Image: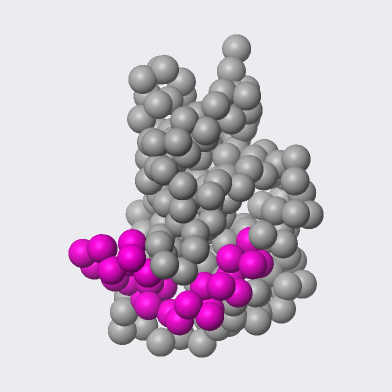
Amino acid sequence: MFKKPVIVFEGIEGSGKTHHIRNISTYLKKKKIDFIHIREPGGNINSEKIRKLILNRKTNFNEITDFLLYMASRNENIKMLKKFYKKKIILIDRFTDSTIAYQHYGFGVDLKLINYINRFLLKNFKVDYTFLNIVNKTNMIKRLQDRKKLNRYDQFSYKFYDKVQKGFLKLARKNKKKYKIINSNLDISYNQKLIIEYLNKII
């Protein structure tokens, strides 16, 4: 009998988190293990509409508007997430830690406000495990340059991404038992095997 945890993949742009969550999705399909996979911002039809608005390169919202749009996108997913909570494995590409890392550590939005709204939206829905993917400046820049299309969040200064990544690491250190830090500067196949090993322990 498999456990049904909520597993989140976090990290700044170019850290490889989306690649690894897709690889895990493929692995679970082969094993015929039930799961759902969503991304934030995004997820359902309404959340994807909000995603397009947030990530549009012409968008120029202030930090509070940006934050509230992320919360609105999350709110659109809550019903679906709670429907499958503890019934299926839930994989999420970015979640509450991204909000804290980007909006608080990156943009300076009040942490109490972020935590209050997250508690209000999520209630008893909790993340069981987080894979935090970290990347150095050289690899991050190279990977972004290799992308065919860049969105608004792909075009901030490295100073901003550095603040965000340090924010992620602070969160990871506070709750070491529920985090696995993945050094995405290492060989990708090595990290794939490492993540699957940890996944099998979790489920």
Is residue 84 visible to the viewer in this orientation of the structure? yes
Magenta-colored stretch includes residue 156 = yes
The residue sitting at 70% across, 53% down in the picture is: 172
The extreme left residue here reads 148
Quadrant of the image containing the C terminus: top right
The residue sitting at 64% across, 67% down in the picture is: 166
Location of residue 98 with respect to 182 vertically, above or below: below
Q: Quadrant of residue 121?
A: bottom right
Residue 182, position as x, y percentages in the image: 55, 46
Magenta-colored stretch includes residue 115 = no
The residue sitting at 75% across, 40% down in the picture is: 177
Left or right of 174 in this view: 95: left
Left or right of 87 in this view: 156: left
Residue 90, position as x, y percentages in the image: 53, 37
Q: Quadrant of residue 141?
A: bottom left
The residue sitting at 57% across, 40% down in the picture is: 7
Location of residue 140 with respect to 38 vertically, above or below: below
Residue 69, position as x, y percentages in the image: 50, 71
Query: What's drawn in magenta, residue-wise?
Result: 141-168
